[in-house]
Image (tube, helix red, strand yellow):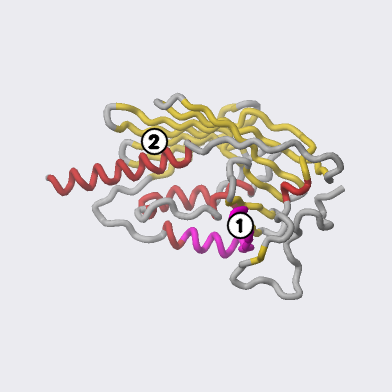
Amino acid sequence: MGKKLVRREGLTLTIAALLLAIGCQKSTSRAPRPSGEPAVRATVATIRTTVQPANKTYVHALMVANDLARSGDEVDQWRLFDLKKQQVTFIDDVAKTYRVASLAAVTKEHRDAYGKQPAPELPLATWTATGAKKTVNGFEATQAIVKLGGYQRELWIAEKTPLPAQLFALMRASEPAPSPVAGVANAIDEALLNVRGFPVADHAELPYDNKKLVVDHAVVKVEQKELPASWFAVPRGYRDISPLAPQGGERVPQAGEGSRLQR
């Protein structure tokens, strides 16, 4: 009985940690674009995250310009998604390095992590596409439900938005597995990797310690803006540490160099 209680509490703590990890990212603000810096027309989605019972709200932007995308809630270490080339560039502003990986490579690494079989006594998460539909913040979306013990998550996924339909799956594939027991969520992860569209509303909750942890993400606005082209390029002078750095092939444009973003 004691062993089962420890396992249950350990799993609950793991899920709670995952919930808080996805919900407690701080919003970031950027300095105004210096006069004369090249600009690019971008699609900017404003995403609001609320966390209860902490009663905290964070806002960040997801930015897309000419098949390149990045999320404004990633600082110091961030990802630049190339939707045309189907690759991700991982940029480290502290070490001043970057590495490039193909979608196929990051997806394999991601699936390998989630594919590890958990201990047989652990419950497995379930994913259910209910077929229910509703309009969320102006977007027609379909419902998916996730369950794992007391943990529940409800996603409303819109296939047709100004955001590229493959962006969410690329973002998911390039995320590391958050826990050694990530295999319990293998079915959910596989479903998320195959999402076409973007979750315009994402509600997750978990009863814990006589409280209910709740994290909500919502796309509250999508608009067109002029943004610095440098936000979509590797900063000048950063060192390429890709395992197989291209020699003589096409390299990732760095800030200040000619690229398809600059006007």
Name the spot of residue 64 as percent of width and height, x first. 71, 44
Residue drawn at 42 percent across, 30 percent down? 214
**Compared to 219, does 94 lie above or below?**
below
- Residue 218: quadrant of the picture: top right
Give left or right: position of 26 versus 186. right
Badge nearest the viewer, 1 or 2: 1
The percent coordinates of residue 22 (x first, y second) are 47, 40
Determine which quarter of the picture holds residue 136: top right
Magenta stretch bounds:
90-111
Q: Residues within 10 Å of mark 1 (few under 14, many from 20)?
A: many
Residue at 87 percent across and 47 percent down: it is 263
Residue 92 is a magenta residue = yes
Q: Which residue is mark 2?
A: 152
In this picture, residue 22 sits left or right of residue 236? left
Q: Is residue 225 above or below residue 101?
A: above
Residue type pointed to by label 2: Gln
Quarter where residue 146 is shown: top left
